[in-house]
Amino acid sequence: MATTWREAGQKMFCGDRLSATAGDIERIMKKIRKEKGDMCKDTEYRVLLATLCRLKLHEKVKIYPKEWMEQRKLARKQIPDLPGPYLDLERPPTAPFEHRGSDCGKNCDVCFPQFFPAQCSASLGDAQKAATVLATSIKDDYEHLRRILENHADDISHRWKKMSQTKRKNLLQENGELFDLQPALVHLTNTNMKPGDDRVFRRKAREMVKTDNSVDRIEFLMRYLWQNLAPLMVEACKASFLDTWFLPYLDLDSLTTSPLPFLSLLNSRTQYPPYEWSLFDKMNIVAAEQSQIIPSQYNQKCISFQPDDYGCLRDWDKTLAHQHAILGYTQGMFVLTAQGRMMAFLRKVVDALLCDIRSRGLQPDELTVRSQLDSTKHTLGKGQEKWLQLVGNGFSTFGRHPVISWSSYTNQHLVAPPHADPVVLSKRILAAYQDSLDGLSALQMDPSSVQLAVKELCSCLYFHYLDKTKEWDRIADEVILLPMKREMQWRQTLKECDRLMTAYGSLKEKDTEENRLRFDFSLIILHDCCSEHLTWAIRDLRASLPYQPGFEKNYEWQRGSSGKQKAPRIHAKDWFIEDPLFWSLDCFCNDQYREFNCDPVVYLRVFDDQLRHGSERERRRISSSFLKAVGDLAAIDEIRTAIQCTRGINRNSLREFTTDPRFKAESKERLEFAKNFNTMRNDVLNIYDLCNAAAPGLKELCTRHPWPKGRVSADTAQRASHARDVLAQMWVKLRRVLKTGVVKNGMSGSPVKEYLDKWSLDLCQEYQNLRQAEQMEIQASLQAQLEARSRLKSVKSELSLKPRALIAIESAAIVNQRTAVLQNMSTNKPKTKTHGEGFDAAPYPVPAVSAISASIEGDIERIKVKRASLPLLRQMFPSEGEFKDSNTSETAETGLKSWKWQYFVEVMLDTGFDVSQGTGSAVSFEHPSGMGRIVFHQPHPQPIIDPVMLRFMGRRMNRWFGWQRKTFVERS
């Protein structure tokens, strides 16, 4: 069966974790057929495959056709003659990894794209000369920039910030070949080459109309000319913006809108030597390779990207080639060219800024730099304090603490080379899993959270056109099933990460060949697991787009003849021009108006820019739950990219490990684990059966049993209990369907029990204790109301016995007395220094945390904070019975209030956490003492934390860190 282009794009990141991803993608893409011919023979096929997977065509295409190159040369007059003769299509060269004595083999997916495809050959002398010239230039520029920064860093910063945006743009245009708009690669690969609105053609046609020509004829002629000029314009763009083709993350717009990005780019490229950026640059040259911005030259040698012999030619070595410590000459020259253009561009701009300061550059014979330079230990001369302050603040906004800085994921080129530290990866994945588990537990134990999610979802136009019989099935899918899948995906990724940490521990204990291979294999497995996770995240994200309230205009809504709703169709147009926010979400792996699809970070960079710099109306188009899904997608792709850019990993360890007899049992166990997970996700989690089971209970909960609001009354406890019972019954039906699916698919063992336990959190004892505490709190509130009424009644009876004149005279005293009585009704005393026992409000079956909480009663490790931080922390960790329901009308009297997100982040910094901004709404808080990491989501669209959200945050902190009210004391 033929696979559609859209389906192939959705499957582009798929792949069995125990088989080569490239092979799976090749089999999928071979099914693609166009109306006129085979897609596999087209350039777009190779470009799409290479861009998405960061590899070239798995099918052995060694030589670009001569006719294809001649056509491109005709379109681009600027292309020089080839430095060597064309390669013969009938007799392609044999690469060193293909020799009979090689252990690698001609089918090696790691080595093949380093040498092929190519178009011409280069002699050994020419290859040596070209590589030496580039490497020497890079070393010279790198040392020159470092020497300049040591003595004139503050001068550069001051002069660059003092320039206007127009002057900065002119300076960059004079010293580089960058495209002006962002994202540059999206503009340069536009195969449509026409405005997004056809009214442009009609308006021009009316202006050109004459008596003997009709508007339609003029419009036809304009379209004909435009379409024929489009290929020439595309080739002209490729010849005009060479820096952007090799460095696609750079453009004039992003570098000049604010003075900070260029300064951060300068710092990142001088803090880390070029060889540490080699894999990041290799990941971003795919567009230049496939578009043949420079001729691809073939030579038997490899180019070294190691610190000792950077840029030198070396013989091919299997181990070094699989670690990407050396690259084949064809691909290595593209990487050297990209790094050379980066360093030359920075040097020209810096020299132009300091044109009146005479400074001599260094001419070193070799690159002698440290492997990693700490910004705090950078050897700068005296008087460079402002530059050091910028580096320390992470190049955030001037005069502000970097509480919310840019995302390190969407601005990788401005921070540091991505690197996969197993400990850091473990913390990130664990924090993401904890966040998903907390969200799932709220859906099982908090009816108000479920009703709030349903209310947010039903605000869109989608349900006005939907068949009412299917309405609650869709709601159950979005509100209940998606969080279940999210928790399961992150749990699977966490399992692979745990195995990576086990292999990492064995490697640290004893560095042997066996432990090294197991560690590399575990890292590659985690990479493939992230790729599969990313595939499902993209699919779910695009499926949720019609439910967003701000995208109605992007779809065609219509009903069928029987009154039933048809699937919404997207208007066929280039949304990048008209609606960049929608384009950034809908075009993941499926941009029909571009020559090839970009990396996910490009789309997320556009999304992040639209939300941060767009209007309030633009931000309201995205719901808070959808924003969390975008943050998940960015987090998993950041991990995948970090592994891809890590040096020293055996990229062929997957095949070596699975074919090694020593690891046969372990490979079989890993395969069974992956099969069980895929069975659970694809077969047990049947969307139709689960939606049919959850929809009736969800409808009853949201329409007949709303969570009680307002002042506590006699029936509040009964209404709350009924809502919780309905929610519990819904999960009972879900678990029954899940168990049936487990039995049907023949699954058993501890993994299945673990899945079911995570979907049975409402059965734990701590949740039952919470329900009892809630009932007792409501009864205590009712008793307090009765006592207050009796006091007020006695006061009124005493006043009724007095003359009216005395009542008028004592009116002020009566008001004061009433105020005192109301204050006595509330147990909220934020000014006192003695507090009640901490209330463990986290109804989760976590024995470790319970043990921590029990030990805290005897010996609490105090955290000293400022006095200004205590009110928020006291509301975050209330004493038992201190606050009434946050939905009541008495929140102002009981001390409950909403807090600004910025203030909450400042309080977290005061408690000792480090803050890092992610893509979307995710913000990570990590304690440097090794306590752990937790992810909170910034409220959207208004950054205001309401009392319900703050109390839920406190429960999460209590669960994962054991914190309670007694933990915090005022700092003297």
Image (cartoon, rainbow, N blue to C red):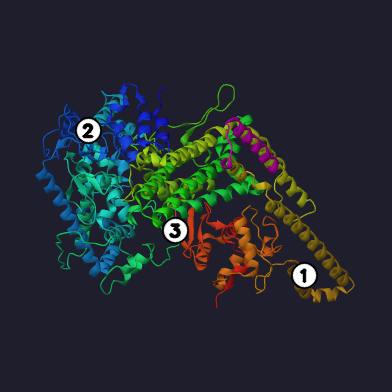
Asked if the residue under mark 2 is in contact with the one under mark 1, i.e. CB atoms within 8 Å, the reply is: no
Q: Amino acid at mark 2?
A: Lys
Any part of residue 858 in sight: yes
> Which of the 4 image quarters holds residue 271?
bottom left
Q: Which residue is mark 1?
A: 821
Mark nearer the N terminus (2 vs 3)? 2
Q: Is residue 742 magenta?
A: yes
Magenta segment, principal secondary structure? helix
Q: Is 492 or 155 nearer to us in this picture?
A: 492
What are the residue bounds of the magenta stretch? 727-751
Q: Nearer the viewer, mark 1 or mark 2?
A: 2
Image point 61% across, 34% down: which residue? Answer: 690
Numbered marks: total = 3
Assign a secondary structure to mark 3. Answer: strand
Give the numbered dot on residue 916.
3
Would residue 399 be found to the left or right of residue 558 on screen? left
Q: Amino acid at mark 3?
A: Ser
Assign a secondary structure to mark 1. Answer: helix
> Which of the 4 image quarters holds residue 18?
top left
Q: Is residue 769 above or below residue 205?
A: below
Q: Which residue is mark 2?
A: 62
Any part of residue 196 in sight: no
Would residue 110 be found to the left or right of residue 610 on screen? left
Locate the N terminus by quadrant. top left
